[in-house]
Amino acid sequence: MDVYRAKTAGFCMGVSLALQKLNTALERKGGAPETTRICTLGPIIHNPQVLAEYESRGVVCVKEAAQLHPGDVAVIRAHGITRQVEEQVKQSGADIVDATCPKVKKAQLSIGRATADGATLLLFGEADHPEVRGLVSYACGPAHVFGTAAELESLHLAENKAYVLASQTTQDRQIFQEIVEDLRTRIADLVVLSTICDATRERQEEARNIASCVDVMVIIGGRQSGNTRRLADVASLNGIDTYLVERVEELAAENFSQKNRAGLTAGASTPKSLIDAAHLWLQSL
């Protein structure tokens, strides 16, 4: 089978930086007291294989700041955390290593500045996603999170109030632009923040282009990864079979028996080794 592999598949800059910081913390542990723990506040990234590897190296994933001890090294996840949780981490006595993706950090600070006068934040994203919770915490006024245009439509927006529109960094840029155009016809005082990262846009555009010229698409990545799920959404819009799997072993050969060309891409948290394995498997069909 011919395989069209996305050049952008795999780790983005933010993920690479976060893992570099975690690796550095592990390396420095050798000179620290034996009781020192290397902890991440929530999963450092959304990929189960990567998380399992770090767990085998002694990294502890804690769910909340209350689980941290004085002297721990607390690595803040790539998705960032809320301002309130960050304050709790500081009060815990742990040493903080901020591995928040620079694009996420920029979005947090932009939201803080844009809403400083109390403007209402309208955030396009997944309400239960850790990045979104962090972004909302930087709003200085009211905040509403919506995942679809229909959800936005259901919100009562006053014409005489100021609004700031922003997005989770991994959302679909095309859909966001449609939302922008709609809101500009409804709200006079609207500030739009460009918070979708270029890496996300490039990956989605490449997935869309590949899907237009193949018979089937395979997306490799963690199911908890928002950007991975959106790659699958983008690819499936072309009307072809699209499989989102965490490992190549989840794929079934019979699903590809009538296919000649397969597209392959992966989420921004997916290691190259998993993408390579999928590539070899597809080529062998």
Image (spheres, rainbow, N blue to C red):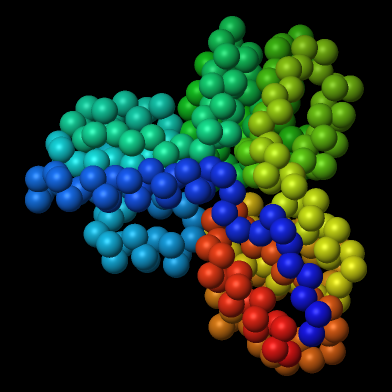
Q: Residue at x 48, y 27 (%)?
A: 137
Q: State whether residue 102 is above or below residue 159.
A: below
Image-based side of 172 in relation to 259, left or right: left
Q: Quadrant of the C terminus?
A: bottom right
| Number of numbered labels in the structure image | 0
Image-based side of 230 in relation to 40, left or right: right
Q: State whether residue 280 is above or below residue 181.
A: below
Q: State whether residue 147 is above or below residue 262.
A: above
Residue 86 picture location, percent across and down? 35, 30
User: Residue farthest to the left?
Assistant: 34
**Residue 146 in view in this figure:** no
Q: Return the residue nearer the eye: 86 or 7.
A: 7
Q: Residue at x 42, y 39 (%)?
A: 99
Q: Residue at x 81, y 18 (%)?
A: 187
**Residue 105 in view in this figure:** yes
Residue 212 picture location, percent across and down? 89, 64
Residue 50 picture location, percent across and down? 43, 62
Q: Quadrant of the N terminus?
A: bottom right
Q: Return the residue nearer the eye: 257 or 2.
A: 2
Image-based side of 119 in relation to 43, left or right: right
